[in-house]
Amino acid sequence: MQFLWRCQILNKGGSCPKRYRHVGRNCFNCKSYFEEKLQCRPEVILTTEEEEEFWESYRDFEDWLNSNRNRQVEFSGEVSSVKPHFQKLVSSRENSFRLLGFLLGLKEGFIGRTRLDNHLYVNISLRFQERHRFTVGDKLEGVAILTEDRGRLILARPRRIEFDLRSGGEVLTPQQALVASRTGKELSSQPEECVSCRWGVLVDKVEKERIRLTKRRTLFCLRGVANPEECPFLLASKLESSGCILPEKIESKILTHIS
């Protein structure tokens, strides 16, 4: 179950009397503020045999994870994404947005000799990125501590990194990530096309209310696009997939427009 914060004025395209651009905690006492309750209920669409096979695979995975969690493992894979690792702290005394480092996404990842169908992430520091300059397409291997955070497998404290291939792609630097943390926009929802976008980042959000601590993830656009329906990068990907315009031309025109 999820509650979405909404504003009657902003939803109609109007301007907030207090000049707010997004709905936040300061809006709770406003007469134009309202909430939408979103409740999702799971529905089994598998056959009986498929469901049994799923639970058997799930138990095997849990056994494997429990035997490797918080232990040093060897890993390898191809870098599919290099994104900043942000943390947002919200409380009555503090409201901060920090850059903790970077998260490398690995596709076709291996831990030891076990191949993982889902994405594997490597948590690296700012200095580690400055040193190794990871880019999408790099193929690497190393050792790290295997951890799990709310459904994501994360390799922490990596070392002994060796590259099987360097792609030579564009490097995302800590300085660029810091600028994006100031100019980017937090989204109120998590559209699939934004989650998979190279400019979409999931932020670890920690909310403190007295003795209650709530952890969740929110979506953050590094390019500062608050409304996915008006996103030029989404339009670019659709045009690219349809073959209407060359990717290089799309990218240069969009970057010129955003700048």
Image: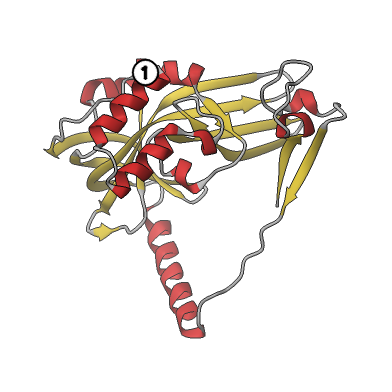
User: Is residue 250 toward the left or the right of residue 232 in the image?
Assistant: left
Which residue is at 77% across, 15% downward? 18
Q: Is residue 160 left or right of residue 100?
A: left
- Residue drawn at 66 percent across, 38 percent down: 214
Characterize the local packing of mark 1: few (<14), some (14-19) or many (20 or more) Cα atoms within 10 angstroms: few
Q: Position of residue 106 (x, y in %)?
A: 30, 45
Q: Residue furthest left?
A: 164
Expressed as whole percent of the image width and height from the top left, the position of residue 222 reads: 45, 27
In the image as oriented, which residue stretches furthest toward the bottom?
49
Write the residue at 34% across / 43% down: 239
Of residues 150 and 257, the one drawn nearer to the viewer in this rendering: 257
Residue identified by numbered label 1: 176
Residue 241 coordinates in the image, percent (x, y): 31, 48
Residue extending farthest to the front is: 244
Picture quadrant where residue 114 is located: bottom left
* Residue 53 horizontal side relative to residue 111, left or right: right
142 to 178, vertically: above or below: below
Residue 8 shown left or right of residue 155 in the figure: right
Secondary structure category for the residue under label 1: helix
In x, y percent, where is residue 143?
A: 25, 41
Q: Is residue 99 above or below residue 45?
A: above
**Number of numbered markers:** 1
The residue lying toward the viewer, choosing from 47 and 57, is 47
The image shows residue 65, relative to residue 8, as above or below, that is below
Q: Quadrant of residue 248?
A: top left
Any part of residue 175 in sight: yes
Tell me the quarter of the image containing the C terminus.
Answer: top left
What residue is drawn where x is 40% and y is 57%?
65
Q: The residue under label 1 is which amino acid type?
A: Gln
Q: Can the viewer see residue 125 in this picture?
A: no
